[in-house]
Image: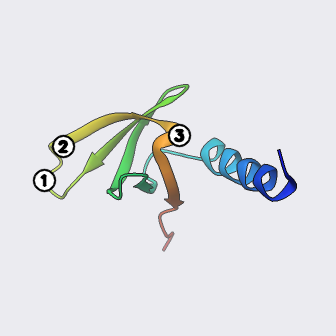
Amino acid sequence: MIRPQKKETQKKNAMLSELATGDTVLTTSGFYGTVIDITDDTVIVEFGSNKNCRIPMQKSAIAAVEKPEEA
């Protein structure tokens, strides 16, 4: 593995290890949602404002994490 790719992999692994409930995530398919439960390699993400769409997905399907802002 070349250096830039290894560095990017380490960055993504660190991001996923810091994932917590309440975080807003962007999935690799382009959906934004809120994490409501986390297991070893699966995350349940809630999509939409009606709170009825909850989808379990692998952690590897998360592209970006946005922590909730503290007031």
Q: How is the image coloured?
A: rainbow
The residue at the far bottom in this view is 71
Residue beneath disc 3: 60
Residue 32: quadrant of the picture = bottom left
User: Rounded to the nearest whole Å, what is the CA distance between mark 1 and mark 2?
Assistant: 8 Å
Looking at the picture, how far across and down is residue 30, in whole percent? 35, 58
Q: Is residue 11 left or right of residue 43?
A: right
Is label 3 or label 2 in front?
3
Q: Amino acid at mark 3?
A: Ser
Q: Are marks 3 and 2 in contact (CB under 8 Å)?
A: no
Residue at the disc numbered 2: 53
Count residues near mark 2 (Cα–Cα under 10 Å), then give few for <14, some for 14-19, many for 20+: few
Crowding around mark 1 (Cα neighbors within 10 Å: few <14, some 14 to 19, many 20+) is few
Q: Is residue 35 left or right of residue 67?
A: left
Single out the mark in the foreground, 1 or 2: 2
Label 3 packing within 10 angstroms: few (<14), some (14-19), many (20+): some
Residue at the top extreme of this rendering: 40
Residue closer to the observer: 36 or 57: 57
Asked whether the beta carbons under mark 1 and mark 2 sit within 8 Å of each other, the answer is yes
Residue identifier under label 1: 50
Q: Is residue 50 above or below residue 40?
A: below
Name the residue rendered at 28%, 37% in the picture. Answer: 55
- Amino acid type, callout 2: Cys
